[in-house]
Image (spheres, helix red, strand yellow):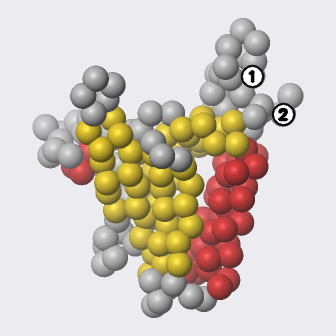
């Protein structure tokens, strides 16, 4: 079984998640150990982003369709996260394409928030645009080096070695 790693921005329950997997490549018969070129990523958000979860058992977190990101693109994203923290100025770094994005935005005071936009559905679609709040479930500039390391570690754990 191919492993999957999840990175939480900035709260494991109430934050936005980025799941990385090696997937099975374009053909599971040709690349049974995973896609050597692209990470198969999904962005997830808390269930209560859309509707209150019924009952005591929460439903799975709503997630984007698979976003194919070059492995080196994920490592560049990690470098950009580290650079955002080192720069000391407000700014943002993002990952994704026209169908799904995740962005980490930093204010001048060093607070971070995660933002995402993705579309669900095939015949009728809904576009989700979500963000963590500046005053709750946020990160701080000092969190960026560890966050960058989480992305790098996830790539090392999931990326096929073949």
Q: Nearer the viewer, residue 137 or 125?
A: 125
| Count of marks placed on residues | 2
Q: Is residue 111 above or below residue 57?
A: below
Label 2 Cα crowd, 10 Å radius (few <14 / some 14-19 / many 20+) = few
Q: Residue at 60%, 73% (x, y): give it.
A: 144
Q: Nearer the viewer, residue 12 or 83?
A: 83
Q: Residue at 28%, 23% (x, y): give it.
A: 123
Residue 60 is drawn in which quadrant? top left
The label number, if any, that marks residue 159 in the structure image: none
First along the sequence among labels 2 and 1:
1
| Residue 139 seen anywhere in this rendered image of the structure | no
Q: Which residue is mark 1?
A: 33
Q: Secondary structure at mark 1?
A: loop
Do the residues under discs 2 and 1 have CB atoms within 8 angstroms?
A: yes
Residue 2 is drawn in which quadrant? top right
Q: Which residue is mark 2?
A: 161
Residue 79 image position (x, y, % from top left): 71, 66
Q: Nearer the viewer, residue 1 or 161?
A: 161
* Residue 53 placement, left or right of 23: left
Q: Quadrant of the C terminus?
A: top right
Q: Secondary structure at mark 2?
A: loop
Return the residue found at the far top.
29
Return the residue found at the far right.
162
| Residue 142 seen anywhere in this rendered image of the structure | yes
Q: Is residue 42 above or below residue 140?
A: above
Q: Residue at 68%, 14% (x, y): give it.
A: 27
Q: Residue at 45%, 42% (x, y): give it.
A: 99
Q: Quadrant of the N terminus?
A: top right
């Amino acid at each position: 079984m191919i492993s999957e790693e999840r990175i939480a921005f900035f709260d494991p329950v109430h934050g936005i998640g980025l799941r990385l997997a090696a997937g099975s490549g374009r053909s599971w018969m040709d690349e049974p150990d995973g896609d050597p070129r692209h990470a198969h990523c999904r962005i997830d958000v808390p269930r209560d982003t859309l509707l209150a979860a019924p009952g005591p058992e929460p439903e799975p977190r709503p997630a984007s369709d698979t976003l194919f990101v070059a492995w080196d693109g994920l490592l560049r994203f990690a470098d950009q996260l580290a650079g955002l923290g080192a720069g000391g100025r407000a700014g943002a770094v993002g990952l994704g394409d026209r169908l799904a994005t995740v962005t980490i935005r930093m204010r001048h005071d060093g607070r971070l928030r995660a933002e995402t936009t993705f579309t669900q559905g095939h015949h009728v679609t809904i576009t989700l645009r979500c963000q963590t709040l500046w005053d709750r479930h946020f990160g701080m500039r000092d969190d960026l080096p560890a966050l960058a390391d989480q992305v790098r570690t996830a790539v090392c754990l999931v990326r096929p070695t073949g």
